Amino acid sequence: MSHILAATSLSIGYPGKTVAADLNLKLTRGRLVCLLGPNGAGKSTLMRTLCAMQPPIAGQVLLDGVDIHTISPRELARLLSVVLTDRIQVGLLSAYELVSLGRYPYTGWSGRLSPDDHRIIRESIEATGATELAARPVDELSDGERQKVLMARALAQQPKLLILDEVTAFLDLPRRVDIMRTLRSLAHQRGATILLSTHDLDLALRSADEIWLLEKGGAFHTGAPEDLILSGHFAAAFRSEGIEFNAEAGHFDLHGQRGQPVSVHGEGLAAQWTCRAMERLGLAVVPDSHLRVVLQPGSWRIEGAVSLGPYPNIATVAEALRGQTSVSSKEP
């Protein structure tokens, strides 16, 4: 495999404080890699170190086989592009003009764009699905639209490595899904090498070719999302008081709030979402219990000390259970 970025025995942090040590990293061409970890683990420090915004404490970072700190700024801009969450001020620039800034590492002293530069700008805008935004002022764009334009600007640099820090932050779910879909397409169809730091764990698990998992204390794991879940590393990295990753369901449980046991009896999608509703109420869903929710065609029943129902939907079941469990869970 061809590695665009590699780091060996890398220690990151600040004078007098090492955040993580002895990291060994490799980024393979044409892959989407997501960097995950709890707050305070050092993700931003690692990202800044990998893109030469701060020096490592020990070890070195090789970009395309060359120590990144020996590369001139102009050449580095041709190899590496960075997209951050910071909202930049661009005055009255249109989206097209902002994307065109990505070509300046290739222009002469005059900064004049050639026909080939304009072709690359148009292709970059098209690749990120921002064609309809090209003529609009950047200041009038939504956060999701602006992120597309910034990614197009990064692509216009024609970098060998694209590093993005929390680019889906503050976006609604459809925009986050759209951005992740675009990144996967850029990696798989255009051969881009992409490293993305994100707190969007679910989308990362569904989208990434590889996960970099940085724990508090500096422990570091890499692998396919599914392998990190099966190994238990993913659950361990995010385990904290009151929260636990459910490997079977693929989501986090608020285990600190789990209360009275309840069992759900039924099949299909309705049973699955009935279980989710029970967990939302703070109940512990178990295979069998004296308190049971039984699904019937088009209705639900509650069976326990007394039978209740039928209920027409989950909302009415939840309301009835609130009364039942609040009574039964009171301290004597």
Image (cartoon, rainbow, N blue to C red):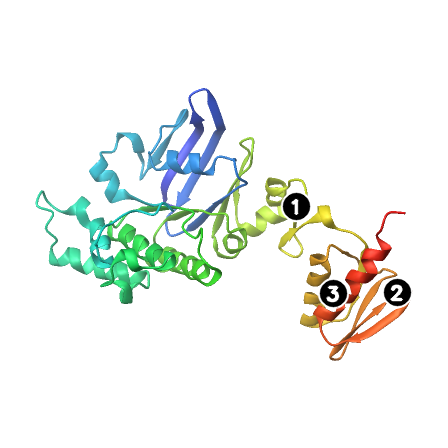
Q: Of discs 3 and 1, which sits in the foreground?
A: 3
* Amino acid type, label 3: Ala
Judge left or right: residue 234 versus residue 63.
right
Residue 41, which numbered label?
none
Q: Measure how far apart labels 2 and 3 are at the Cα level.
A: 15 Å
Foreground residue, 208 or 41? 41
| x and y, in percent, of residue 271 in the image | 72, 69
| Mark found first going from the N terminus, 1 or 2 | 1
Q: Residue furthest left?
A: 110
Foreground residue, 46 or 166? 166
Judge left or right: residue 64 versus residue 233.
left
| x and y, in percent, of residue 316 in the image | 74, 70
Q: Measure how far apart labels 3 and 1 are at the Cα level.
A: 22 Å
Q: Residue furthest top?
A: 16
| x and y, in percent, of residue 225 in the image | 54, 50
Estimate how packed mark 2 is, as few (under 14), some (14 to 19) or many (20 or more) residues with alpha carbons within 10 Å: some
